[in-house]
Image (cartoon, rainbow, N blue to C red):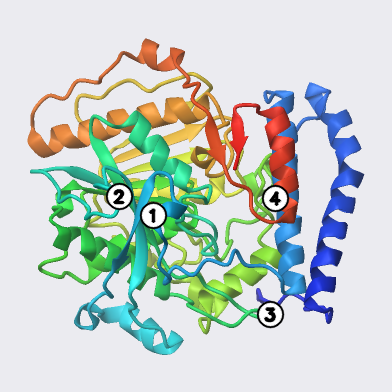
């Protein structure tokens, strides 16, 4: 039986807790730095021999930031101070517009999810969201959609703890889509769903609170004038889990004026929250990629706290067999697996070859393939681009060699980021072709795609004492990263 437990809460004053946190974080980092340097200078001792020194060293630093988060939670001093229900002024953002979304209608909450709403004692709420790209004049309204305009709705990642704010790292995914897919997509909408929490913080917003908020965001887009067939629902990491849950809800509970989205774009989706794939055999991704990814083990205190916060009153036993929680769970019954993804739209699944949860993503791929149509797949090394297909398949699987979990949020992860976004651009062009049944040619040849990597500066915000230091070290390794 797997159990969850709260992190320890130390009885320090607020100032003493923060001082202890900063000193401990810096001391641990200083102790590890010499070892990292010595190891990463030797290719055979890097997490992946194909990585260069910069990437190997940066991944070690980023993984160390998980120690920072665990320590913050243990001391009760964490939190980024952002409430997704609070207004955000345009002056605080460089390239986004904040709006509010009305609560999802109570009358539309049905079936299995209604039971979870009652059990968790959560309900629909007014919530924020961010427009990136075409968003109107500063201080003015967001312009309505053009005829048959396609849009991306982004469910951000972050283990149901991060936010959709433009300063958060997952916002780089929307920026990347807008940069590389601008012939199809001129704006994205990111829903800033409620974040879950557990002791030592107040217990807040367990499942299905985030699902209700994502449904509210999707309903907002429909009411705003976008057609369901023109909405690409994108989710990274935990956001991929949320995008799958939203689609499942609309497929299993048909609502006349809320049809399912036209397509799904799943980026390193966290699809087995109960970790049934963990440590199954020595060749499993949780073993092989443990040192090459920044994700911590699901048995670590930070992960256990996250799972407990998300599940709320739901038991681990119930979560293991719940496709809304873990659609890749190996504990789903044959009855639940039968037609698990029937009725889902065309789906693009992206995975990094170096991530710990690769096995569960492959299970998701196999289950999607079984219920939808023949699979288009490929494993892509650096600089490699898949061929353009005459007819876009129902399931497109893209596994990028040596890439990290949710690597599209790291602008420095080149050339994989640019080449992957170019493949996504071609997939989106294929979606438009299927929708319109008219030829859509790629804007550039695949040879050209392989050649160009943008040299525009990367603006990155690092909050918190520990992450500030990580950011400074990152700037040394990647001068193109500009810290703000």
Q: Position of residue 74 (x, y in %)?
A: 76, 71
Alpha-carbon distance for marks 2 and 3?
40 Å
On residue 43, the disc is: none
Report the quarter where the C terminus lies: top right
Name the front one of labels 2 and 4: 2
Residue count near mark 1 (Cα–Cα under 10 Å), binned few <14, some 14–19, many ≥20: few
State the SS at label 4. helix
On screen, residue 236 versus residue 463, left or right, reads: left
On screen, residue 225 versus residue 298, left or right, reads: left
Alpha-carbon distance for marks 3 and 1?
33 Å
On residue 138, the disc is: 2
On screen, residue 205 versus residue 75, left or right, reads: left
State the SS at label 2. loop
Residue that carries the numbered disc 4 in the rendered image: 467
Res 437 visible = yes
- The disc, 3 or 1, on the residue closer to the chain's N-terminal end is 1
Name the front one of labels 2 and 3: 2
Q: Position of residue 384 (x, y in %)?
A: 46, 19
Report the quarter where the N terminus lies: bottom right
Alpha-carbon distance for marks 2 and 1?
7 Å
Res 393 visible = no
Q: Position of residue 368 (x, y in %)?
A: 34, 49
State the SS at label 3. loop
Q: Are marks 2 and 1 in contact (CB under 8 Å)?
A: yes
Name the front one of labels 4 and 1: 1
Name the front one of labels 4 and 3: 4
- The disc, 4 or 1, on the residue closer to the chain's N-terminal end is 1
On residue 200, the disc is: 3
Residue that carries the numbered disc 1 in the rendered image: 90
């Amino acid at each position: 039986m797997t159990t969850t437990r709260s992190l320890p809460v130390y009885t320090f004053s607020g100032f003493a807790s923060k001082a202890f946190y900063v000193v401990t974080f810096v001391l641990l980092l200083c102790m590890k730095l010499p070892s990292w340097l010595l190891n990463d200078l030797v290719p055979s001792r890097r997490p992946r021999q194909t990585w260069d020194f910069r990437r190997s060293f940066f991944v070690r630093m980023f993984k160390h930031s998980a120690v920072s988060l665990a320590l913050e939670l243990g001391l009760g001093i964490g939190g980024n101070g952002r409430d997704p229900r609070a207004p955000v002024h345009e002056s605080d953002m460089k390239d986004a517009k904040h709006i509010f979304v009305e609560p999802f209608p109570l009358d539309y909450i049905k079936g299995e999810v209604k039971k979870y709403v009652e059990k968790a004692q959560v309900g629909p709420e007014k919530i924020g969201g961010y427009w990136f790209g075409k968003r109107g004049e500063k201080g003015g309204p967001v312009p309505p959609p053009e005829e048959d305009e396609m849009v991306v709705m982004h469910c951000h990642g972050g283990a149901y703890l991060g936010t959709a704010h433009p300063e958060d790292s997952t916002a780089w995914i929307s920026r990347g889509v807008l940069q590389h897919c601008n012939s199809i997509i001129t704006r994205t909408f990111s829903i800033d769903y409620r974040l879950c929490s557990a002791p030592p913080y107040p217990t807040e917003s367990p499942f299905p609170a985030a699902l209700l908020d994502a449904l509210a965001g999707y309903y907002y887009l429909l009411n705003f004038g976008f057609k369901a067939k023109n909405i690409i629902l994108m989710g990274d990491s935990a956001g991929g889990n949320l995008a799958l849950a939203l689609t499942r809800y609309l497929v299993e509970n048909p609502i006349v004026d809320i049809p399912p989205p036209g397509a799904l774009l799943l980026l390193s989706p966290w699809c087995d929250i109960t970790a049934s794939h963990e440590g199954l055999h020595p060749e499993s991704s949780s073993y092989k990629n443990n040192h090459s990814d920044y994700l911590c083990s699901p048995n670590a205190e930070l992960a256990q706290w996250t799972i407990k916060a998300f599940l709320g009153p739901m038991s681990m036993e119930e979560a293991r067999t719940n496709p809304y929680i873990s659609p890749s769970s190996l504990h789903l019954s044959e009855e639940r697996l039968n037609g698990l993804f029937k009725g889902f739209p065309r789906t693009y699944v992206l995975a990094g070859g170096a991530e710990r949860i690769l096995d569960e993503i492959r299970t998701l791929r196999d289950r999607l393939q079984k219920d939808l149509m023949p699979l288009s797949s490929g494993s892509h090394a650096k600089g490699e681009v898949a061929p353009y297909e005459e007819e876009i398949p129902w399931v497109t699987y893209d596994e990028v060699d040596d890439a990290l979990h949710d690597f599209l949020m790291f602008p420095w992860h080149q050339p994989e980021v640019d080449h992957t976004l170019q493949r996504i651009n071609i997939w989106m062009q294929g979606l438009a072709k299927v929708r319109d049944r008219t030829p859509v040619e790629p804007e550039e040849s695949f040879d050209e795609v392989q050649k160009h990597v943008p040299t525009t500066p990367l603006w990155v915000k690092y909050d918190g004492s520990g992450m500030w230091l990580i950011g400074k070290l990152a700037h040394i390794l990647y001068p193109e990263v500009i810290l703000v």
